[in-house]
Image (cartoon, rainbow, N blue to C red):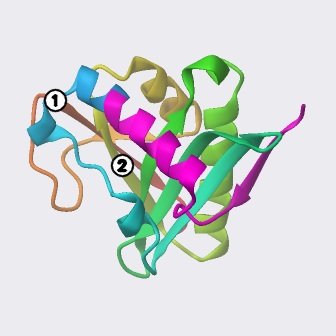
């Protein structure tokens, strides 16, 4: 089947299950006090857009854009189910997020990821993100890696 990516509500049972898998995965790599995730309810709030990748009807990946003001937005909840990793799905979701941010006139996109998420680093760096110090209100931590990408002047 062809993989599709579309904006969807996170308040669907299969998306909730996918996000639960994401949370479980993150907690294997990072101490709980340093995992800064949004709940599915927070993902459904105004100012957050969620993209879901599907193989047929099955939710297999996700990513979100959280707006902080008219100038800056944040990539959140990037995840691809383990059975689908290495197929470029995360790269495609990130492309959708960045395209939407640019279309809205967002000037800078930032993110926080874990210190052991090497595959994520590769995706972000190939998309033109650069490492930086702490962003937004995140604490400086040995467990976090921060990135930013300038979209517009």
Classify mark 2: helix, strand or loop: strand
From the viewer's side, name the closer residue of 51 and 143: 51
Q: For mark 1, give the secondary structure.
A: loop
Does the magenta run of residues contain 60?
no
Q: Give x and y (percent) for residue 21.
A: 43, 34
Q: Do we see residue 115 in this rendering? A: no
Check contact, mark 2 vs mark 1: CB within 8 A. Answer: no
- Residue placed at 33% from the left, 57% from the top? 38
Residue 129: image tag: none
Q: Is 2 included in the stretch rendered in magenta? A: yes
What residue lies at 20% left-to-right and 44% top-to-bottom? 133
Q: Is residue 58 left or right of residue 130?
A: right
Q: Is residue 47 left or right of residue 82?
A: left
Name the residue tied to disc 1.
143
The quarter of the image holding the N terminus is: top right
**Magenta part of the chain:** 1-24
Residue 89 percent location from the top left of the image: 68, 33
The residue beneath circle 2 is 111
Label 2 and label 1: CA atoms lie apart by 14 Å
């Amino acid at each position: 089947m062809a993989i599709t990516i579309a904006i969807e509500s996170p308040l669907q049972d299969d998306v909730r299950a996918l996000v639960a898998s994401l949370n479980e995965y993150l907690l294997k790599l990072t101490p709980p006090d340093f995992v800064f995730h949004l709940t599915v309810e927070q993902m459904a709030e105004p100012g957050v857009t969620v993209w879901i990748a599907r193989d047929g009807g099955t939710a297999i990946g996700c990513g979100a854009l959280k707006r902080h003001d008219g100038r800056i937005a944040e990539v959140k909840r990037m995840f691809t189910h383990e059975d689908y990793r290495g197929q470029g799905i995360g790269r495609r979701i990130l492309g959708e997020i960045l395209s939407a941010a640019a279309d809205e006139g967002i000037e800078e996109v930032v993110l926080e990821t874990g210190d052991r998420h090497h595959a994520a680093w590769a995706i972000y760096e190939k998309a033109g993100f650069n490492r930086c110090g702490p962003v937004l209100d995140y604490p400086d931590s040995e467990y976090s890696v921060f990135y930013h990408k300038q979209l517009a002047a």
